[in-house]
Image (cartoon, rainbow, N blue to C red):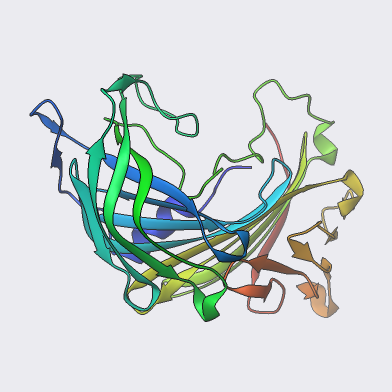
Amino acid sequence: MRRLYAVTILALILGGAFASTAVGATGGRAEVEPRFELTGSHGYRILVSARLRTVTIGVSKGNSQRAGSSTTYVARGTAGVHGFSADLHQFGRVNVHFHRTSGAVRGLPPDCFGGNGGADTIEGYFTGSFEFKGEKGYTEVHTNRVKGEMVLPPTERCPLVAGGANPLLEGQNAELPPAKTRMTLEAVDKAGTGGLVFVARREGKTSFYAERFGTIGRIGILSIAYALGPQKSFVSDSQVSYGKVTPPKPFFGTGTLERGKGGNRVWAGDLSASFPGQGKVGLTGTEFHTTLARSFP
């Protein structure tokens, strides 16, 4: 399953793309991505990175190839080859300077992807100050020195959160079941610049994905949850009129899409997803626009 909404949502949260660039290590114009990872309280992994005028803080805990959740905080800031800074308002602040400890190593860090292979990774450490405190103190951290790296990628992309590779992406060589058994259920509740998305998909994998997006003050918030489940966790009929999902954690409960009186579809149940800092968020109700369709390659 692809991250259907993440790129668009981040653009909405930030009010559009930014156009600034930073001077590269060789004196030319180049986009850079300084970043570092550390552990916050209660075992949360925190990946802090910056690109152009965007600073992101990705928070996750216990993610695996089968299930996980994360929340990413997005702020306006500044970034360049010397470090980055941003005011995170009620969540804290970052103002760090980069010190290199190695020459440029050709290639990307293991969790980055894309581009034309022309990236360089420079190892080093950051000094200055970084403070972060999540909603109601679910995790917090502060440091004045942390190991990190500077990535000089022309077109490459690195994940928003630690361990951010998408395990729900179907492999090109995956053996798919018969077409009539492939099914996608989607429920979307969007209002203004915020909303909720839930997607269940049964193909080579039975996968579930939820996304919550919006703002708190001047900070954009993007939360996701994902899980792989057995085939029985997503059942439907051949007439494409009924669907029932019971995903594993970080989801809870059951969601049912069926025809009600008058032939209208009803999306109901106690299905919810647990996001870092957001708690359990309900994913059913009359405010969701739903679709149920057979999936094809």
Looking at the image, which is closer to me, 38 or 155? 38
238 lies above or below 153: below
Quadrant location of the N terminus in the rendered image: top right
Picture residue at 74% right of the left edge, 44% below the top: 66
Looking at the image, which is closer to me, 87 or 7? 87
Picture residue at 69% right of the left edge, 71% below the top: 283
Looking at the image, which is closer to me, 214 or 275? 275
Q: In the displayed structure, does residue 144 sit left or right of residue 257? A: left
Q: Which quarter of the picture shows residue 277?
A: bottom right
Q: Horizontal and vertical percent for residue 137?
A: 53, 77
Q: Horizontal and vertical percent for residue 239?
A: 86, 52
119 lies above or below 4: above
Picture residue at 84% right of the left edge, 67% below the top: 254
Picture residue at 66% right of the left edge, 41% below the top: 168
Asked if one can make out residue 236 in the rendered structure from this viewpoint, the answer is no
Asked if one can make out residue 206 in the rendered structure from this viewpoint, the answer is yes
